[in-house]
Amino acid sequence: MLIFAFFSWWYTTGFREQLAKIKMSFVKLNDQFSIPLLLKTLFQPFRQISAGKVDGALSDKIRAWGDRMVSRAIGGFIRTTVMLIGLVVMAACGIFSGLRIIIWLAMPILPLTSFAIMSWVVVPWI
């Protein structure tokens, strides 16, 4: 009776808990990399102290415009790099999560199959 209770828990409640843990890991990764926010602010200036209007000569305005463009290019590069790293990490997490689910489903039957393989390969049947 205990074995049936174990299998019942393993393939119902335990499996749902594993899926909840996997979902939480994706939620944490999404929060860590915040890809939607990075997409929204992709070409905004990166850590620019003064991004407002500049009053003064034409050369000062051109210099401020150039500074803003360089800052936007740096911001776009850094945000794109962080997004790509985030997508790679999420893809790796997806692969490991799939392996985790496969191992979770196969774990209870592994001792039986390994014993069967051992007796078939190692023990000579005469």
Image: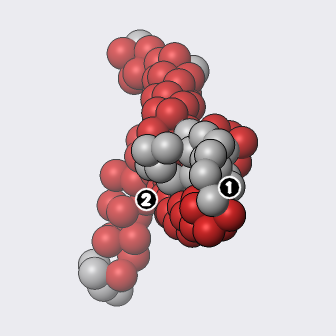
**Residue 92: horizontal and vertical position, in percent?**
51, 61
Q: Is residue 12 visible?
A: yes
SS at mark 2?
Answer: helix
Label 1 to label 2, Cα distance in Å?
A: 56 Å
Q: Amino acid at mark 1?
A: Phe
Q: Residues within 10 Å of mark 1 (few under 14, many from 20)?
A: some
Q: Residue at x 43, y 44 (%)?
A: 49
Q: Is residue 22 visible?
A: no
Q: Which residue is mark 1?
A: 43
Q: Which residue is at the front of the view, 82 or 113? A: 82
Q: Which residue is at the front of the view, 32 or 27? A: 32
Q: Which residue is mark 2?
A: 113
Q: Residue furthest left?
A: 123
Residue 64's place in the image compared with 106, above or below, is below
Q: Residues within 10 Å of mark 2 (few under 14, many from 20)?
A: few
Q: Amino acid at mark 2?
A: Thr
Quarter of the image with the C terminus is bottom left
Specify whether 28 is left or right of 65: left
Q: Which residue is at the front of the view, 120 or 14? A: 14
Q: Residue at x 32, y 71 (%)?
A: 118
**Residue 52: horizontal and vertical position, in percent?**
61, 40
Instruction: Kindly report which numbered mark, 1 or 2, lies closer to the viewer in this rendering.
Output: 1
Quarter of the image with the N terminus is top left
**Residue 25: horizontal and vertical position, in percent?**
47, 36
Q: Residue at x 51, y 33 (%)?
A: 31
Residue 99's place in the image compared with 37, above or below, is below
